[in-house]
Amino acid sequence: MNILKSFLTLMIATLSTFGFSQSIDSVWVEKKTSNLSSSYISSLIYPGARLGVEFPVNTIYISKIRKSGKAKDFTKDRFVTANLSWYHHPAFHDNVYLSAGWTMRRTKSNGFLTEFSPEVGLSRTFLGGTTYQVDDNGNVSIKKYAGYYYALVSVGGGIGYDFSITKRKPFSVFSKFNVLMMFPYNSTIYLRPVMEIGLIYKPINFLSLKVKSKSRKK
Amino acid sequence: MKHVIPFVILFFVLTSCQKEKITIGTNVSETFYLDNNGASMRLLVEGNTASKTFLIFVHGGPGSSSYFYNTDYISQNIENKYAVVYWDQRNAGGSQGNSNGDHLNLPQMTEDLKKVIQLIKYRYGQNSGIFILGHSFGGLLTASFMTKDDNQSMVKGWIFADGSHNYPLNDTLTRQMLLTVGQQQLALNRNTVNWKIIIGYCNSHTGNFTFEESNQLYAYATDAETYFKKVKKINLATLIDYDPVQYGWPVTSILFNLNYSTNASFNRDLAKTEFSSKLGVVTTPTLLLYGKYDFICPGGLEEDVFNRISTTDKKIVISPISGHNIMLQDESFFCKEVNAFIESHK
């Protein structure tokens, strides 16, 4: 829990710093659609999949004037995300985890994007083999659905390309590197690096929300 | 209805691996788990289950893993004759659980081993012949098992390989061996800088060792065998050479379990534990193996077991080129001796 607390404090502090360093020119409310994401996740050779929804929270449109006089435009989007993920590690375990996250995405005017997304969640593993119990009299029985619940924290960052900006196609592609941490795992933690390659689909009207948008010029 | 279908599919995917599958054959590989008191311990059975003869590896550490013993050489030279059971003890290797550190102690692990044997017999037949092989800390665990109640009646043979059944005696023997061999090496002008440090430490710490002194002796003993060229070096790099990805090792689980168990408080209790005084009850055939260059569990431990057990069916053999990991450092010698022992007692 201490790790989680420290992490959230750090996140809030970082966001606050961003907020104070820039001047807000205008603020308005706009209706934005939620996004759907799906991806293939893998840890080395072990496969998995992930489905998610991104709920927009706010958008900041930033225009910076460079020394050369050229304008540099980019967008900062903030989403609350909900994800359902699964991976399969043969003979070890299958892991299904539900997570909620905070995605910070920065998209340039040419469509390239970078993002950082911390998540917290709950994991349920299913052991990778028949699981037995033996009582004190030596009687053996099979334990059904054997596995464990773990608290989960994930941190990930990646790059991508938003086709809606330059090609007017309603999707983005991305690749991310995540680190999962599950606990308490045998009274300690379990870490797992996860690579993710996926697609974000932006429907015209799906779970639309009114969000606060800002425009800044520097 | 269509929204339910993906969840039904996911449910079947997740539970399909847990369906019971018991294979009797000559080239078997199957993983299952034993759930006991807060831990789900991984068991990998490989090789010839049709032989009805099972060799259970009881790994060292505490907190190491049986993955490390599952070499190609053992597959080709033992598994072709008998089935080998690679058991990851609680809080070790691929074993899983939640907050279970309170159950990490020797009596609990002794009970775990008993249940592992009961489970093997349940799966492969009550007439299965079981041999247990304790390596390093596994020596202490198997000694605990063999001297408790009537446990030894469950096994046909006990193999003690570079093991320790008496930690205080272990420290004394390690110190003596470091001193004796160190002085010989100094006389030969080999690794003088390192040996001088070790000898200096041994001369200033003469007995009645604290836990910290015991750990320092262990560290020097680990280094000492690497000063001999004829001893094959075993370290993280050589273990990674086994291709853990190909064999599906849960690498981070192995590392975090090892770190936790190595530093767990029960190691302080182990430091005072001995079974020399109880070994007289052992009447089971016993094979004792050790490496000439094993400073961690010196051969004096095997000799102590040999002299104290009551069985007359016992043998002690020494590998002339091995350190603390005889099954990895002198594979042909190890497999030859283990196979001969099992063959004559199965």
Image (cartoon, coloured by chain):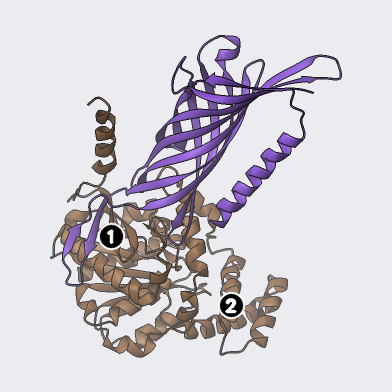
Chain colours: A purple, B brown
Q: Using the rendered image of the protein, determine whether residue A74 is visible from the camera's viewpoint.
A: yes
SS of the residue at dot 2? Answer: helix
Disc 1 residue crowd, few under 14, some 14–19, many 20+, Cα 10 Å: many
Question: Can you tell which quarter of the image residue B128 is in?
Answer: bottom left
Say yes or no: labels 1 and 2 on the same chain: yes
Residue B326: % across, % down: 44, 66
Q: Which mark is residue A184?
A: none
Residue B73: % across, % down: 38, 53
Which residue is rendered at x = 60% and y = 81% of the image? B213
1 or 2: tag closer to the N-terminus:
1
Say left or right for B144 vs B68: left
Which residue is rendered at x = 69% and y = 41% of the image? A14
Say left or right for B12 vs A171: left
Q: Of the residues shown, which amino acid type is indicated by label 2?
A: Leu
**Quarter of the rendering occupied by the C terminus of chain B:** bottom left
Number of marks in the image? 2
Viewer-side residue, B256 vs B202:
B256
User: How far apart are the two marked residues, 1 and 2, measured between alpha carbons?
Assistant: 35 Å
Disc 2 residue crowd, few under 14, some 14–19, many 20+, Cα 10 Å: many
Q: Chain of mark 2?
A: B
SS of the residue at dot 1? Answer: strand
Q: Using the rendered image of the protein, determine whether residue B52 is visible from the camera's viewpoint.
A: no
Residue B13: % across, % down: 27, 37
Viewer-side residue, B100 vs B64:
B100
CB under 8 Å between discs 1 and 2: no
Q: Which residue is mark 1?
A: B34
Say left or right for B231 vs B317: right
Residue B233: % across, % down: 54, 60
Say left or right for A178 vs B205: left
Q: Which residue is mark 2?
A: B217
Q: Chain of mark 1?
A: B
